[in-house]
Amino acid sequence: MTAYSVGKTVFQLEGGTYYIDEQHALLNNQIQGMGLTMDFRFGYFLEELEFILNTGFQYDQYREPLVNETRSGIKELTFGAKYLIWDPFKNYEE
């Protein structure tokens, strides 16, 4: 995410996927799975103001010597706002 605002009445949607494969020798556990991420940015009211929704969903299998379970759910959910205080390129003249 950049330091700059997306602009008034602009929607921006970014998404991605990832794969996870972790092993811990001392705890003797293993996690394998995948996840989806989505970032939604929306400029509203002012050119410098934007609202941000950041989400992540993960599906994985967790294994220990006595435990083998499948887990799924929202890993991350963040809502916030950002206001651009200073833009070095605004009113730039060469």
Image: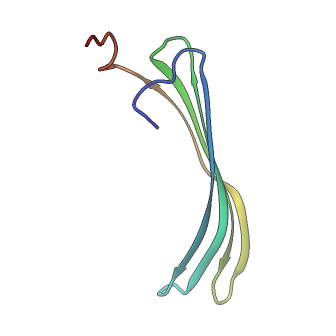
Q: Residue at x 32, y 9 (%)?
A: 91
Residue placed farthest to the bottom in the image? 65
Residue 24 in the image: state x and y as whole percent.
50, 82
Residue 56 visible in the shown view: no
Which of the 4 image quadrants contains residue 85?
top left
Residue placed farthest to the left in the image? 94
Say if 66 sits above or below 54 in the image. Answer: below
Would you say 2 lies left or right of 35 here?
A: left
Which of the 4 image quadrants contains residue 38?
top right
Residue 33 in the image: state x and y as whole percent.
67, 68
Residue 82 in the image: state x and y as whole percent.
45, 26
Which quadrant does the C terminus fall into?
A: top left
Would you say 71 lies left or right of 7 here?
A: right
Residue 63 visible in the shown view: yes
Asked whether 29 or 84 is in front, the reply is 84
Say if 61 sits above or below 39 in the image. Answer: below
| Tag count | 0
Q: Residue at x 66, y 63 (%)?
A: 34
Q: Residue at x 47, y 87 (%)?
A: 26
Q: Tell me how the rendering is colored.
A: rainbow
